[in-house]
Image (cartoon, helix red, strand yellow):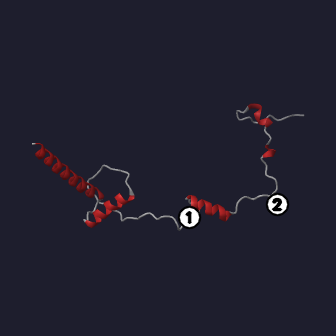
Amino acid sequence: MNKQPTKTYDFGEQLDEVNLSDLMQSPSSDSEDKGPAPEKVRQVAEKAGWESREGRSPNRKKKVVRKRRTYRTGRSDQFNNRCHPDVIQGYYDIADQLKIPTMGETLERALNALRREVETQVAETTKFNQ
């Protein structure tokens, strides 16, 4: 009998010993356990906060969509920082209240206000120590 060599893919003779019959699925019957119902799986997944491929859940908290603030200002460097959502919203609220067109200008004005506050504290401390 002429036996064809099997491809080894660098596994050597180990592939000849592999029995794939255990991995083959047997025909299903009605008496077999088919797992949890799809609706039950969907409920558990939503409770766990998993997103469905079907789209977002109506119970999910929606993200705030803000108006784009893009202007040519000459500012070229980025300043990224992590904040609590209420701090970010307060920052936008102040910019809107003062009608400041860019977030960069809002940051510059906030920095100038902090500098004035520090100068005042330093002046008071110096005056008190003399």
What is the distance, in whole Å, between disc 2 and disc 1 at their CAs? Answer: 34 Å
4 lies left or right of 115: right
- Between 73 and 127, the residue placed more toward the observer is 127
**On the rendered image, what quadrant is the N terminus found in?**
top right
- Eyeballing the image, is 59 above or below 120? below
Q: Residue furthest left?
A: 130
Left or right of 8? Residue 77 is: left
User: Mark 1 falls on what kind of element?
Assistant: loop
Which residue, given by chain and number where applicable, does mark 2 sit on?
31
Residue type of the residue flagged with mark 2? Ser
Residue 123 horizontal side relative to residue 22, left or right:
left
Residue 71, how many percent across, how many down?
29, 60
Location of residue 51 (image quadrant): bottom right
Q: Classify residue 66 by image quadrant.
A: bottom left
Query: Do we see residue 40 in this rendering?
Result: yes
The residue under the point 27% across, 55% down is 107
What amino acid is found at the position of numbered circle 1 in the picture? Answer: Gly
User: Could you say which quadrant of the image residue 90 lies in?
Assistant: bottom left
Q: How far across and how far down the image is residue 129, in percent? A: 12, 43
Image quadrant holding the C terminus, namely top left
Marked residue nearer the N-terminal end (2 or 1): 2
Compared with 124, 13 (above or below) is above
Neighbours of disc 2 within 10 Å: few (<14), some (14-19), many (20+): few
> At 30% from the left edge and 58% from the top edge, which residue is drawn?
103
Residue situated in front as seen by the camera: 39 or 102: 39
Report whether residue 52 is seen: no
Residue drawn at x 82%, y 35% is 4
| Residue 61 position in % (x across, y down) | 48, 64
Q: Which residue is mark 1?
A: 55
